[in-house]
Amino acid sequence: MKRNLALTVILFLVQITFGYSQSKTKIELKDNWYHLNGQKFFIKAIGYEIGARPGQHPYEDEKKDDLELMKFDLKNIKEGGYNTIRTWSQYSEAQLKLIQESGLKLIMGLEVNPEADYGDPKFINDCKLELNRVLNYAKKYDCIITYLVINEPQTDHIHSVTGKAFVGLMQTLINIIHKEHPGIPVTLSANAMISDYMDESIFDVYAYNCYDHIEGQTATMGFKDYIKGLNELNGLNKPFITTEFGYSVSPDGGNGRYGSNTLKQQSDGLIANYRDLIDAGAVGMCPFYYADGWWKGSEKNKHNLNQPEEWFGFWGYSDLNDKYGSPRPVWFAMRDYMRGLIISPKNNSIHTNVNIPIELYNDKDIKKVVVKFRDEIIYSKNISREGYFADQLTIDPVGIEDMELAFEFYDSDNKIIKNESINILASKTAFELPKLTIEVTPGKDLNEGKIASIKTKIETNENFKLVGDLKVSYNTHLGWEIGPQASVSISDQLDIKIITSENFFNIPDNCWIVNASAGISVQYGKFIFKIHDQKIIYRGNWAKEVGRK
């Protein structure tokens, strides 16, 4: 007994001296999920930066640990229902120790300049030196569940420094992390709208910043289906996480859904995004972000009213002296929504089998789930533990039936603490849907013309009603600009079995990649979904190393 006690003490002292052993948490990526210690783990994260309070700049000022303020934030984050934080730069060892002690997990960004020359030997060497410096202490902490090696590299910049250089740098960083911190996944945070062409197969996880704006493929395919399409283009063979999404509540500025949203629009928008992204296949969420960043408008001491980037926070600050901030309504809305997450069935999904998988991710207070259809209970099950839950639901559709499934989550006192409806289209037998396809000219090389054509063909089905206009987009990937789009009325063709349309767009000389897409809404009863198609076209072979094959 004394010998065993002595050994325990020695092991404890070793942990204190050398950091936390990475053997505490085993990470596996399988079935398109994160598995932590053998259990499916849904990443309920939030974007978080230290050193970004009023009067601070996280990337220009001297980096300080700010441990007391960080403790305050981490406590809030954990009480808010989150199990992970996402960062844009590496944390110090003192900060990592604090996260470890909090019980939260970490998706840690690395401060690799996305605007640098990826092929410059000096830059490459600097990246390697800094990464090895960070890994020297970071590898001792098992709170880290993913590394993000770069954030939002731009298309035209990758073109200018070459796709070969970009892939080379990424592979170098991946290899170092895999060697020095084995078992920890590596990815990047790509912007969905500008990085849709990128082959991300060298990474362990697919990760995108996904914003629900009103242009581009979001306009033609819908937010959910566009992001789902990205996941499908990637091959559905790795976990997919969203590393940013959100709504800015800037009093002025912005356009579309970018800026000038009300507090209610922020709350409703975040929940709608969360739902859509789960339906798109995401197994991890990192909304943007914990608190406002005054520094983003280049005046860290002033909260600029017309700068949307400064107003995405779930918490806001009243003035320069306010170091703690206060929560906005979105904080409480998200806390309540995340208590019971419905992973399956997906909203607006189509089923031709009477047995439907149920997948839930619950917090500790959920003790029972009930599913109702037309106010009748069709499923009821007690929940024995926090986290992932799987079962099967049997339905009995009559013909093709739009079904609204009402999920109710109960606590130990049998009180409802959350409810949410999932709409599905169901049938006992297979059925045909309307179909939309596009033909794009030039379709192989943008060098083949100055004018582009998108021919759209819609094959209708008498059981389904087309709703609204046909949306067509020619996303030219010029910086953050989405590119032109068109709205086409088809009201005079609704009785035709095959509806056709053709739209023309100018091809800019400095456009290196295009995503051409078209889509329209379809309705069956209360069930509304999108039919759509997209094509990616390159200019020459510049993207042979970085683009999708």
Image: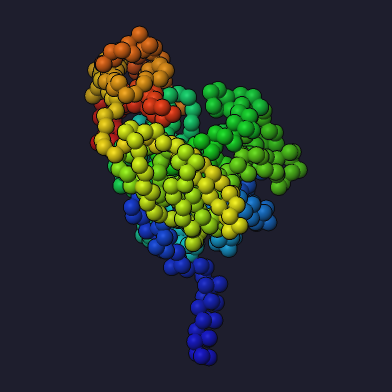
Q: Quadrant of residue 517?
A: top left
Give above or below for 201 relative to 10.
above
Give above or below for 202 relative to 460.
below
Pick the front one: 524 or 25: 524
Pick the front one: 125 or 151: 151
Q: Quadrant of residue 115?
A: top left
Pick the front one: 98 or 440: 440
Farthest residue to the right: give it. 321
Farthest residue to the top: give it. 492
Percent position of residue 520, x then y? 37, 22
- At horizontal 58% and vertical 58% (from top left) the residue drawn is 412
User: Does residue 3 appear anywhere in the picture?
Assistant: yes
Percent position of residue 97, x then y? 57, 62
Point out the image quarter for the C terminus.
top left
- At horizontal 59% and vertical 31% (from top left) the residue drawn is 265
Percent position of residue 52, x then y? 63, 43
Q: Is residue 345 left or right of residue 365?
A: left
- At horizontal 76% and vertical 43% (from top left) the residue drawn is 321
User: Does residue 106 appear anywhere in the picture?
Assistant: no
Percent position of residue 150, x then y? 44, 43
- At horizontal 61% and vertical 39% (from top left) the residue drawn is 330
